Each structure stands twice: as structure tokens, then as C-alpha cells.
């Protein structure tokens, strides 16, 4: 249920990490994120897909305000979030973050009741303790942990990974958020339980109108949750392709997306094609320090031309998708 | 043992070895009724229960299961290195040499075991990052391994061998050998580990989630290399994984494990086509795919089993949508449901016609 009202807007985000800089070595800088422009709409599901180290978690942290980008502007409902940072503003409550490791995200010496009550005590001062506890119970049941009394007095180690992930979801809901950024929420959960968590997220999206940013390296789960939403493919700190999930599944347009699609294994032995190599020039990654304005995918791209290396790449619009590739001759995708 | 070592030195090296040293498809390892228990003071946990498995030459066999299903226990038992308080309670692990003689892994003494491990069965561990020593160069890792098995090896011998195995995994040996682990990317480290597992010319390589920490493009690349080694040299491979998509794409045989039991075993294509056990069925339906219908996908209900409180009868019964009261009576045995295809479900409807 997304409409086209913009909830958050990211403009020209740059993020640089510094490395080294000792007595003998010069400081080195890594562009972790480069020129990210992204709108997040109300009530949508946006999947951010990329390999490890592409900057997707950094981007998630920037959206939730946990990291401040080097350059760029982020607005929440039209207002710059760094002017909104005070507790009274809506932003801090409205945008919540769910981490990958649910065990690390919950205090091991506190019961689920304590973990749930902490944000309620701070942000719902009007509620008495008993009322707060009632709210915590309701939210736990909302995320499928019923009966709540049974779970409230448990410790994190007494629950399964899937249950802990649901607690994190319930804890985020105490703030009545408008946007939840979920960073790899299912990668540490057993395969048989993953879909249940993803289903819960789409249910919350549908019924409560909460927008989700789903960060993952797994295209298949991204397709499952954001089937009617959008997807953003990242590579080495840049957005390579941004389009609706439908369009991307039907025809990925960036050479990187195409290689990625070929590499994802499909759970059907009849589709297995292990003899054709991936459409890549080499496996070598570009040295992050050496690149100068050109396309970061150049070293692996089979369509790469001389100009790709030095010319800055602009976004092109192809069939409703934004593609960051100058080369127009990338062949149409065939399944 | 000495006899084997002298033979090995004369053996042609990896790169020159011709395809299929033994007939492909023949067993390299046969596991029969393997039961492993972890014995605590008050209770004991049966991590593997009557596991039988054939691992075939020149084929990739997958052991699929969720965490705690007993995959790693079975793999450790293959090398007879289950750590205390675990022990092999019953069952045989029979290793078939190429010349037809057999080795019973359970009967080897400590000295024989040390020579057996890595030279006959080697292993690629999950997380190559933590398997390499950060203060040793890559060449030193290989040299150290060879030195243990063949004490007379010189460093230049080791360098020659290392160069050959590194080229099998498409790495530039001369550059890589001098490097330290932190200078390599995750995918390169994992390829170094694969090269190391090839070093002593084993008959079987155990791959324990070899690509979990890597991105899909690197994963695909590494599996293609493994598959090539598997086909061209005839080395058997046992892949431990939870990812059924990888199994579908790269393996020839698969065994599905649940609560320490093999619930289905067969050719990968057969298992996917017939899905003779409801757990396999559930697992395939719970795995999202890039193509195909999203509506039919659903998670398996309930929670993974607690090995300390297993239900009576079929262990999958509490989560099984097809279960009825007959499933609670006694634990079904693994029975033949098709050619080379076994399932531990008593319901005839799932059996191959």
C-alpha cells in the first residue's frame, strides 16, 4: 500500500571512512557511499540488495540517524533530520532499526518484559506501569508471540532466533513507527522459519502502513518481501539500479544486476546451469582507493569501454528503472 | 601407513592427474548406522541417530539440514574427531581405497588417524577468515601441512606443490604465496583453503558451508571451481549446507537431515521431483526463489526440534501437516521409495510410483 508521498529523502549522500594515517603512512580514504539519491515513500517496501562491503548497512544506519554522512542532506517529511534530532521531534520515534543479530540486540540479563518496558517507560510517560505492560503484551501478541504472559518473563537465551527477531519487531512497534529499517533480519534464522518473519513484516506493512527498508544480500528473500515494492541494487557504495521489483525480475538492465541474477541459485535442479560462466570479465574487484570518478564495476564488466573508467556515470531512465551505466548497448535480458 | 606414503610421492600431481582415478559413482566412504551421543552427567543427546550414507567418487553429495540437525556431527565422525563429551556409540565408517582395500576409520589408532586425516579426507571449514593464521604467509601454511605428513619435504618442494594446487583454484600462485591472509579478499581466502584441502591428494573433501560469508557472485565462482575439481579428478565431495538452492544447482546426491536423522536420501533431481518426505517438501516450499510462484511458498510451522525432548514416533510429526495418529506409534525406518531413493516417512502417498 504505497502512495507517492515522500517520507524520507536522501540527497547526494557521501560517506568517507578514513584508514591508516600513522607516522609513516599517509591517510587513506575510502568512499563507502558515493552520491546516493533515494526517496523513501510512505508505506512502501524497499529492498536494498548488495554484496558484503557495498555499504548497504552504512546506508541503513544513515537513514536511521545512527551515522552522520560526510556530505549530503537527509529530510524526514521535508525537514532536515539533523535539525530534528531532539527527542520531541517525531523523527527519532518514527524511524526504527532492527539488527541482524537478535541475540546481541537484546540484553541477556534482562527479561523480555524489561526489554519491552524500557522504551515504553521513556516514550509513553502518560502510561502507568500496568498499562505499559498491557501495551507490551498486546504488541507481543501482534507479532505472533501469544500468549504474551508466557514470553514476558523469559530471557533472550530461552527463545529461538525467530522468536527473538519477533521481540525486536514488537519493541520497534512500541514507538508506533512510520518506517522500519531491517538489516538482514532473517539471515541468522533457520530456513524453515524465515518466511514466517518475512510474512510478519509484510503483514505489518499492509495493516499498519509501516514502510520497510529491507537490507539484504539475498535476492530471493528480497523478491519475496518486496514483490510489489521497489528494489535498489548497490555495488561498492553506489546505487547501480533502482526500479520496481517486478521490472527488475523481468529484465535486469545493469550489467551488474544481470550477473547477479545469473549467480543466484534457484531451488530447482532442472534450472541448474553450471557450465556457462557468469557474464563477467574477471573476478577482480576494483581497488576502492584507485578509482577516479568512473564506474566501480568497470573491472568486472564485459561491456566496459575506455570512457567508463574516467567519465562520471549519470543515471539513465530505461523502462521506468534508473540505471547507472553509460553504455546503452547492454543486451535485453533473456531468461 | 608407510606403504601409502611412498606410493603417494610417486603419484602424479593434481594438475596432471587424469580424470577419474577410480570409476565415478563408486563409494569412497560408506557410513553405516552411525550413532553419535553427547553424554552429559544427567542426560545424553543423540546428535546423529542411525545415519547411513554413501559418498560417491566424482560426485558431490549434500548433507542439508537446519542448525542442530547433525550435519557437522556426521562430518566430524568421518574424521573421527568428535570432541568430548561426544562419542560414536555404534556404527561403521568404511573408507574405500582406490585399490579396493578398505579402512575402518573407527579402528585406527591415534598415529594412524593423524596420517589419515587430510591425506585421505580433508575439510574446508566455514569461515576461511578464521582458519588461516594471520602471522603466517600463505606458503608457510602449505609448508606446515606438508611437513607434518611428509617430514622430509623441503620448502622448494612445498612451493612447487603449492603452485600447482593454487593454480587449480585460479589463483596467481607466485603473488599469493608471499602474502599474508589479511591481504586477501574473503573469496580468495576461501579458495586458498580449497587449495590447501587438495594439497595431499585426498579422496574426499568435506565442505562445511564453504560460502556462507561470501556474496552470490563469489559463491557461484567458487562452486564452479569445486565442481570442476570434483568432475575432473574424481575426488568425492561432501557439502554441508542449509541452503537448498545451492544443493539444487550443484550437487548430484543429497541427504536431508532432521533431528540427527537422515529423513530422505537420493539423487538430487529425484528428491526435488518426488519430495518423498514432508520435511523436504516443506523445506523446498519455504525457500524463496527468483522465479516461480510466490503464493505457494509457506514456512514450516512449529519450531525446530529440541534434541532433549524428541517426540514419540516420527520426529517430524509435531510440524508435519500430513501427520495422523499412526505416525506417533513408532519411529519410521528409512525405506526404499524408488531407485537409489530412501525416505523416512511411512505414508505411502509420498512414495514414488
Image (tube, coloured by chain):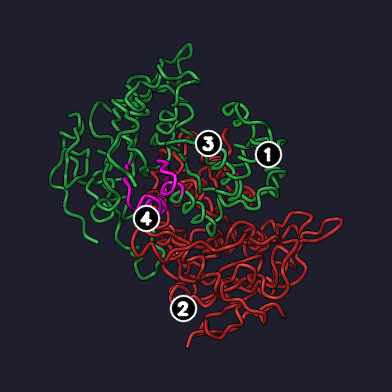
**In this picture, is A11 found above or below B46?**
above
Label drawn at residue A113: 1
Give the colour of chain B: red
Residue A108 can be seen in this image:
yes
The mark that comes first in sequence, 3 or 2, is: 3
Q: Secondary structure at mark 4?
A: loop
Q: Chain of mark 3?
A: B
- Between disc 2 and disc 1, the foreground one is 1
- Which residue is painted at 35% across and 20% down in the image? A80
| Label 2 and label 4 in one chain | no
Cα gap from disc 2 to disc 4, whole angstroms: 23 Å
User: Is residue A211 within the magenta segment?
Assistant: yes
**In this picture, is A86 found above or below B330?**
above
Chain shown in green: A
Q: Which residue is mark 4?
A: A264
Label drawn at residue B274: 2
- Which residue is painted at 39% across and 34% down in the image? A55
| Label 3 and label 2 in one chain | yes
Mark 1 surroundings: few (<14), some (14-19) or many (≥20) residues within 10 A: some
Quadrant assignment, res B133: top right
Cα gap from disc 2 to disc 1, whole angstroms: 46 Å
Amino acid at each position: 500500500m504505497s502512495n507517492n508521498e515522500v517520507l524520507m529523502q536522501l540527497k547526494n549522500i557521501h560517506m568517507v571512512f578514513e584508514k591508516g594515517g600513522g607516522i609513516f603512512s599517509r591517510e587513506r580514504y575510502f568512499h563507502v557511499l558515493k552520491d546516493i539519491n533515494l526517496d523513501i515513500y510512505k508505506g512502501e517496501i524497499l529492498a536494498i540488495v548488495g554484496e558484503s562491503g557495498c555499504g548497504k548497512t552504512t546506508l541503513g544506519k544513515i537513514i536511521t540517524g545512527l551515522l552522520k554522512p560526510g556530505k549530503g542532506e537527509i529530510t524526514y517529511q521535508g525537514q532536515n533530520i539533523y535539525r530534528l534530532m531532539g527527542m520531541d521531534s517525531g523523527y527519532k520515534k518514527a524511524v526504527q532499526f532492527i539488527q541482524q543479530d537478535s541475540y546481541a540486540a537484546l540484553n541477556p540479563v534482562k527479561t523480555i518484559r524489561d526489554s519491552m518496558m524500557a522504551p515504553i517507560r521513556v516514550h509513553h510517560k502518560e502510561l502507568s506501569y500496568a498499562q505499559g505492560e498491557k501495551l507490551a503484551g498486546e504488541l507481543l501478541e501482534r507479532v505472533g508471540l501469544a500468549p504474551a504472559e508466557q514470553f514476558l518473563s523469559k530471557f533472550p537465551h530461552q527463545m529461538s532466533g525467530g522468536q527473538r527477531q519477533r521481540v525486536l519487531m514488537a519493541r520497534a512497534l512500541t514507538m508506533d513507527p512510520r518506517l522500519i529499517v531491517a538489516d538482514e533480519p532473517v539471515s541468522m534464522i533457520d530456513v524453515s522459519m524465515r518466511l514466517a518473519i518475512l510474512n510478519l513484516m509484510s503483514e505489518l506493512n499492509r495493516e499498519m502502513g509501516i514502510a520497510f527498508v529491507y537490507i539484504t544480500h539475498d535476492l530471493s528473500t528480497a523478491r519475496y518481501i518486496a514483490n510489489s515494492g521497489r528494489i535498489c541494487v548497490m555495488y561498492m557504495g553506489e546505487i547501480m539500479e533502482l526500479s520496481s521489483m517486478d521490472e527488475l525480475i523481468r529484465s535486469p538492465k545493469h550489467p551488474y544486476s544481470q550477473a547477479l541474477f545469473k549467480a543466484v541459485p534457484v531451488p530447482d535442479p532442472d534450472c541448474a546451469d553450471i557450465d556457462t560462466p557468469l557474464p563477467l570479465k574477471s573476478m577482480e574487484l576494483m581497488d576502492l582507493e584507485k578509482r577516479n570518478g568512473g564506474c566501480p564495476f568497470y573491472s568486472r564488466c564485459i561491456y566496459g569501454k575506455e570512457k567508463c573508467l574516467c567519465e562520471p556515470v549519470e543515471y539513465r531512465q530505461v523502462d521506468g528503472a534508473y540505471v547507472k551505466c553509460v553504455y546503452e548497448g547492454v543486451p535485453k535480458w533473456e531468461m | 601407513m608407510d606403504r601409502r606414503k611412498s606410493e603417494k610421492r610417486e603419484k602424479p600431481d593434481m594438475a596432471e592427474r587424469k580424470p577419474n582415478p577410480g570409476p565415478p559413482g563408486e563409494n569412497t566412504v560408506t557410513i553405516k548406522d552411525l550413532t553419535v551421543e553427547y553424554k552429559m552427567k544427567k542426560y545424553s543427546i543423540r546428535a546423529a541417530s542411525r545415519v547411513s550414507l554413501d559418498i560417491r567418487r566424482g560426485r558431490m553429495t549434500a548433507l542439508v539440514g537446519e542448525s542442530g540437525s547433525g550435519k557437522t556431527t556426521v562430518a566430524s565422525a568421518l574424521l573421527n574427531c568428535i570432541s568430548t563429551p561426544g562419542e560414536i556409540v555404534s556404527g561403521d565408517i568404511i573408507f574405500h581405497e582406490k585399490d579396493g582395500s578398505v579402512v575402518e576409520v573407527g579402528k585406527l589408532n591415534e598415529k594412524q588417524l593423524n596420517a589419515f586425516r587430510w591425506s585421505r579426507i580433508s575439510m574446508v571449514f566455514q569461515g576461511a577468515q578464521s582458519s588461516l593464521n594471520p602471522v603466517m604467509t600463505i606458503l608457510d601454511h602449505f609448508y606446515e601441512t606438508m611437513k607434518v605428513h611428509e617430514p622430509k619435504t623441503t620448502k622448494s618442494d612445498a612451493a612447487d606443490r603449492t603452485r600447482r594446487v593454487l593454480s587449480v583454484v585460479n589463483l596467481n600462485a607466485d603473488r599469493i604465496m608471499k602474502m599474508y591472509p589479511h591481504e586477501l579478499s574473503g573469496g580468495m581466502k576461501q579458495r586458498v583453503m580449497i587449495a590447501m584441502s587438495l594439497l595431499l591428494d585426498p579422496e574426499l573433501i568435506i565442505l562445511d558451508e564453504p560460502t556462507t560469508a561470501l556474496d552470490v557472485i563469489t559463491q557461484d565462482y567458487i562452486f564452479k571451481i569445486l565442481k570442476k575439481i570434483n568432475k575432473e579428478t574424481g575426488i568425492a565431495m561432501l557439502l554441508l549446507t542449509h541452503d537448498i538452492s545451492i544443493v539444487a544447482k550443484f550437487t548430484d546426491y543429497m541427504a536431508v537431515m532432521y533431528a540427527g536423522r537422515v529423513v530422505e536420501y537420493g539423487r538430487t533431481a529425484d528428491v526435488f521431483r518426488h519430495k518423498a518426505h514432508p520435511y523436504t517438501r516443506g523445506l523446498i516450499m519455504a525457500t524463496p526463489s527468483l522465479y516461480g510462484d510466490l503464493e505457494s511458498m509457506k514456512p514450516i510451522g512449529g519450531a525446530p526440534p529440541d534434541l532433549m525432548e524428541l517426540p514419540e514416533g516420527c520426529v517430524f510429526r509435531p510440524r508435519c501437516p500430513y501427520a495422523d495418529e499412526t505416525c506417533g506409534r513408532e519411529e519410521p525406518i528409512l525405506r526404499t521409495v524408488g531407485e537409489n531413493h530412501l525416505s523416512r516417512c511411512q505414508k505411502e502417498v509420498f512414495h514414488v510410483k
